[in-house]
Image (cartoon, grey):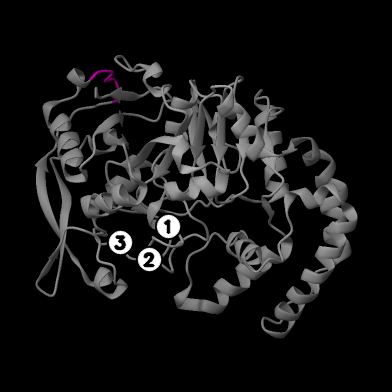
Amino acid sequence: MAAGYDPLAWTHVPVTVVVGTQWGDEGKGKLTDLIAKEMHVVVRYQGGHNAGHTIVVDGETFALQLIPSGVLYGHITPVIGNGVVVDPGVLLAEVDALTAKGIDCGRLRVSGNAHLIMPYHQELDRVTERFLGKNALGTTRRGIGPAYADKATRIGLRVQDLLDPKIFRQKLDVVVKEKNGVLAKVYNRLPSSSDDIAERYLEEYAPRIAPMIADTVGLVHEALAAGQHVLLEGAQATFLDLDHGTYPFVTSSNPVAGGACTGAGVGPRHIDRVIGIAKAYVTRVGAGPFPTERDDERGAALVERGHEVGTNTGRRRRTRWFDAVMMRHAVRLNSLSEIALTKLDVLDTFDTLEVCVAYEADGVRYEHLPYHQSVLHSVVPVYEELPGWNTDLSGATTVAELPQAAQDYVAFLAQQAGVPVRLVGVGPGRDQFVHFAA
């Protein structure tokens, strides 16, 4: 544990939310793993297996997709909440992989109200992206969007349906008939077989998943009533939010802190702390606007030094300088109480650094995110230049051990965001954080 870090400082509140403040890949898994030590329940509240969390423990890497990061602690109950869409095959493969590494997944609980990703969701995701051509959204093609669409149109199958074969078959037959019509007539694809899907889900998946299925809302509230501490963990990030992100280049759920309430079944009065995770620079995977992006040598250096490749997609991330305009908007949307800044060490070799402090478009200066997409696509970043430090930060354990230029960079980002930076990541290891005092 980094010197000066007091884990008890995290334990005075009933519910803490961890949310990404950029376009994902900020290091939420690592931060969640760090603070989970003093928690009792960790809940993943939205998304599917389209977002990965990477945690390095004693030199061993754990890449998680669906299972909450708290699974690595023996005292924690990890929960997949009702707001998540679950591919049961992926879930069980992840359980098997963790078990093979000696991690006990017997405490894992899955909400019966979470929706299932079905084979036809994945097929629809693939053919739709191909159909869109140059206008493709850059999805992971894992069926996330179609599964959420079925949830919204009230034809989705839920995890609890695995416990009732009769109901499962009745619902499945209705949906498959509708999906086959679309796949065959619109996309010229072969139809799905209800029998094949039912056999796989009811005979292969259901027996193994059944012991995990629970009333997770009741579980969380029982924990709170017992004085236990609950951590709500989001996937993706603020600017991939369905309502508040850079639409349509977004995910199909609500990663913002407000989504934690609906996705976990917790009212807002229980939440006292909202920690925003941000990289010391910005990355994005897939299509969509990216005001500070610049494809040059410095961008390539960020990719190489930061190992900017998607945890479970393998896609190269787009990179560039920290965007304070985005951060201010994330502070507003999530009611952030503080920021945890990751990957500061990736900037170790740069002589100078730039921070986007505003946008300009058609002679207008924007210090907050413009609401209209046409404006956002045309803005020009306004930068302030700061000195680099050309020093390896990976061994730092206290603020005093950071070069003054690194301290000044962190302070400048906090001043621009309007909320304090409390933790700074200086390496990939589980405990490579420096704690900034309140």
Res 290 label: 3
Q: Quadrant of residue 67?
A: top right
Residue 309 seen in the figure: no
Q: Secondary structure at mark 3?
A: loop
User: Do labels 3 and 2 touch, CB within 8 Å?
Assistant: yes
Secondary structure, magenta segment, majority class? loop
Q: Secondary structure at mark 2?
A: loop
Count neighbours of disc 2 (C-alpha within 10 A) and say few if under 14, some if 14 to 19, many if 20 or more: some
Query: Circle 1 sits on which residue?
Result: 240
Q: Is residue 131 above or below residue 41?
A: below
Res 169 label: none
User: Do labels 3 and 1 touch, CB within 8 Å?
Assistant: no
Is residue 179 inside the magenta stretch? no
Tell me which segment is drawn in magenta. 394-398
Q: Is residue 105 above or below residue 164?
A: above
Query: Circle 2 sits on which residue?
Result: 288
Q: Earlier in the sequence, mark 3 or mark 1?
A: 1
> Quadrant of the image for the N terminus?
top left
